[in-house]
Amino acid sequence: MGQGIGNLTRLEMSQILCRIEEALEAASLAIAPLFIRGAVKAEYKSDDDPVTDADRLANCVLREALLRNREGWLSEESVDDLTRLEKTRVWVVDPLDGTREFVAGIPEWCISVALVDNGRAVAGGICSPCTGEIFLGAVGQGIWRNARSVRASRRRNVSGAVVLASRSEIERGEWMAVTAAPFRIRPMGSVAYKLALVSAGLADATWTCRPKNEWDVAAGVALVEAGGGFVRGKGGCHLTFNNRSTLLPGILACGPNLCDELSKYVELSESH
């Protein structure tokens, strides 16, 4: 039985991916009655940070399905228990990434689950109930979209590439400096879903102009790396998870051949 990543064997990783898939399916089923456009009521944790009953319900279902003894838990919809810092393995979860899109009836939201082992996002799953997609992957073992093996884009230059951008960042003018670039910019909601699409080669790249919390990106980072893609934090730093502060710098994710060329455009967007 070969070794997986870190202290996890291939068999353990396979079992973890099954847990993730089952948890995603259970959460999706639980919140299915709330998909109806116009029927979603939102509260606001801050001026621009909505939360719904679907967020809370999915959080409960995921915690029940995933959490085991000696594992930590970090979720956008749970009070942060810093005992997670003492754990080797931690679940990093966004029960509903893209709540604004969910409330508006835009099918660009998802359920996002990652397992972090010794600070590295080693396995991830992202479910898009509206599109019927489940992305599953583990670093060193590959990635699957609806049980079909996929991988990150092998495009060799940015000309004609599809780059997914945050709709809210575009609305704030944060992508103005790169609008004349030779790639196509496609606005989209959930950052986790954008990362999933990049991991599977359904888009060539994405980046964020603003910092993100760990739960926003952990699963997507695991998937991109599992798909053979490139992902780094602002300034090219490696991303680590299960930190005391959950806020991470902006990230770039892309196919392995585009990182150097796209890094210049990321720097250009950050300078404006």
Image (cartoon, rainbow, N blue to C red):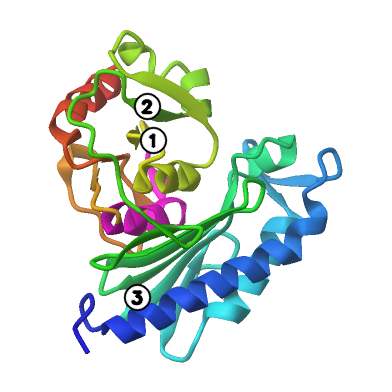
Graded by Cα atoms within 10 Å as few (under 14), some (14 to 19) or many (20 or more), the crowding at tag 1 reads many
Disc 1 or 2, which lies upstream in sequence?
2
Callout 1: SS: loop
Which numbered disc covers residue 85?
3
Quadrant containing the N terminus is bottom left
Q: Position of residue 96 (x, y in %)?
A: 61, 54
Q: CA distance from mark 2 to mark 3?
A: 37 Å
Callout 3: SS: helix
Graded by Cα atoms within 10 Å as few (under 14), some (14 to 19) or many (20 or more), the crowding at tag 2 reads some
Given residues 151 and 113, the one toward you in this image is: 151
Q: Amino acid at mark 3?
A: Leu
Quadrant containing the C terminus is top left
Disc 2 or 3, which lies upstream in sequence?
3
Q: Tell me which residue sits at (32%, 39%) in the image.
A: 250
Q: Which residue is mark 1?
A: 203
Q: Tell me which residue sits at (36%, 67%) in the image.
A: 123
Q: Are marks 1 and 2 in contact (CB under 8 Å)?
A: yes
Which numbered disc covers residue 81?
none
The vertical placement of 230 against 80, above or below, is above
- Does the stretch in magenta take in 20? no
Q: Amino acid at mark 2?
A: Val
Graded by Cα atoms within 10 Å as few (under 14), some (14 to 19) or many (20 or more), the crowding at tag 3 reads some
Q: Which of the two marks, 2 or 3, is nearer to us in this view?
A: 2
Q: Is residue 153 visible?
A: yes
Which numbered disc covers residue 162?
2
Q: Which residues are magenta?
A: 211-226
The vertical placement of 61 against 235, above or below, is below
Q: Are marks 1 and 3 in contact (CB under 8 Å)?
A: no
Q: Quadrant of residue 4?
A: bottom left
